[in-house]
Amino acid sequence: MQSSGSFKDGKIVGRWKWFFKTGEPRGTGGFDDEEQKHGVWKRYHANGQLWDEGRFEHGKKKGTWKVYDKAGELLKTQTFK
């Protein structure tokens, strides 16, 4: 798996992208200054279809998260407080 993103003082920070060996996107997401997941995150199936999407706030899932099947059809929606 390949990735691209930034480090600050040896910590993972900011927006990151991960890729399958084929070069197709595997996921995108961000980190705060404490290396906690933060902001919008998306992961993809190997065929390029969106797998899930939602938001983290300092390492915890917040708001509406959606999960999709390999054909891109919505499977479920979850809400986190």
Image (cartoon, grey):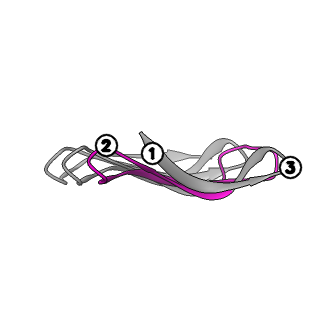
| Other-residue count near label 3 (Cα within 10 Å), few / some / many at <14 / 14–19 / ≥20 | few
Question: In the image, 61: left or right of 47?
Answer: right
Q: Is residue 23 located in the magenta-colored stretch of the structure?
A: yes
Percent position of residue 27, x then y: 43, 50
Q: Residue furthest left?
A: 71
Q: Is residue 80 above or below residue 63?
A: above
Q: Residue at x 29, y 54 (%)?
A: 24
Residue at image mark 1: 2
- The front one of 39 and 79 is 39
Q: Is residue 67 above or below residue 24?
A: above
> In the rendered image, which quarter contains the N terminus?
top left
Residue 39 seen: no
Q: What amino acid type is highlighted by mark number 1? A: Gln
Earlier residue among tags 2 and 1: 1
Secondary structure at badge 1 equals strand
Residue at image mark 3: 9
Percent position of residue 76, x then y: 31, 44
Q: What amino acid type is highlighted by mark number 2? A: Lys
Q: Is there a contact, CB below 8 Å, between mark 2 and mark 1?
A: yes
As measured in the structure, the alpha-carbon distance from the residue carrying label 2 to the one carrying label 1 is 7 Å
Q: Is residue 72 located in the magenta-colored stretch of the structure?
A: no
Residue at image mark 2: 21
Q: Residue at x 68, y 42 (%)?
A: 59
Q: Is there a contact, CB below 8 Å, between mark 3 and mark 2?
A: no
Please state the extent of the stretch shown in magenta in the rendering: 14-38
Secondary structure at badge 2 equals loop
Percent position of residue 60, x then y: 66, 42
